[in-house]
Amino acid sequence: MRIEPYLFFDGNCETALGFYQHCLGGELVAMHRYAESPEAEHLAPEWHQKVMHAALAVDGQRFMASDRMPGQPFAGHAGFSMSVNLPLDAARGEAVFKALAVGGMVTMPFAKTFWGAHFGMLVDKFGVSWMVNCETGEAPEAP
């Protein structure tokens, strides 16, 4: 069993996935458009090129995404964070953090923590919350 995040966007899924691929690396392993659906003839033409389903694979993990279903309201991204863990690679973690933060809002700067990791939180330019964590292999600071 795998539990994988699935993000919904309000018509900008392809742009968001391109941004995430730039920030995280990896490859798009699936990209299906609403035009491929048997129901495409019932959709407004502007929905044909929207993303019906996509997946981005990075370092043996993946998350999936799509544009919301036509006619359904977009509620935004709330109540969760995408969590990226980069063991023993604080430099890569900082690079990922800085890339994801472009155009977004840093809610906790990426820095060394009392629990012996480098960690930061942000909301990206698409409204998705991210946590970037890098275990350093060092013992946590004593209280």
Image (cartoon, helix red, strand yellow):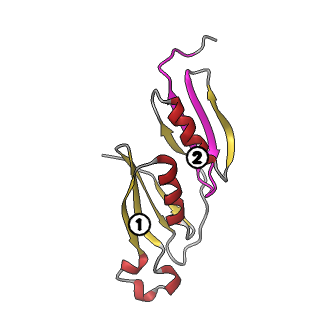
| Residue 50: x %, y % from top left | 48, 74
Q: Distance between the residues labelled 1 and 2?
A: 24 Å
Write the residue at 34% across / 44% down.
60
Task: Name the side, left or right, on which 108 lies relative to 69.
Answer: right
Callout 1–callout 2 Cβ contact below 8 Å: no
Count of numbered badges drawn on the protein: 2
Q: Residue 126: which quarter of the image? A: bottom right
| Residue 125: x %, y % from top left | 64, 56
Magenta-drawn stretch contains 22: no
| Residue 131: x %, y % from top left | 57, 40
Mark positioned earlier in the residue sequence (1 or 2): 1
The amino acid marked with disc number 1 is His
Question: Can you say whether 130 is above or below 41 in the image?
Answer: above
Image quadrant where one finds the C terminus: top right
Q: Give the crowd class for mark 2: few <14, some 14-19, many >=20 residues within 10 Å.
A: some
Of tags 1 and 2, which is closer to the observer? Answer: 2
| Residue 9: x %, y % from top left | 54, 64
Q: What element carries label 2?
A: helix
Q: Name the residue under label 1.
A: 53
Task: Name the side, left or right, on which 19 lies relative to 120.
Answer: left
Task: Name the side, left or right, on which 3 lies relative to 103.
Answer: left
Write the residue at 67% across / 53% down.
103
Q: What element carries label 1?
A: strand
The residue stretch that appears in magenta:
116-140
Write the residue at 63% across / 29% down.
111
Write the residue at 51% across / 62% down.
8
The amino acid marked with disc number 2 is Ala
Q: Mark 2 points at which residue?
A: 99
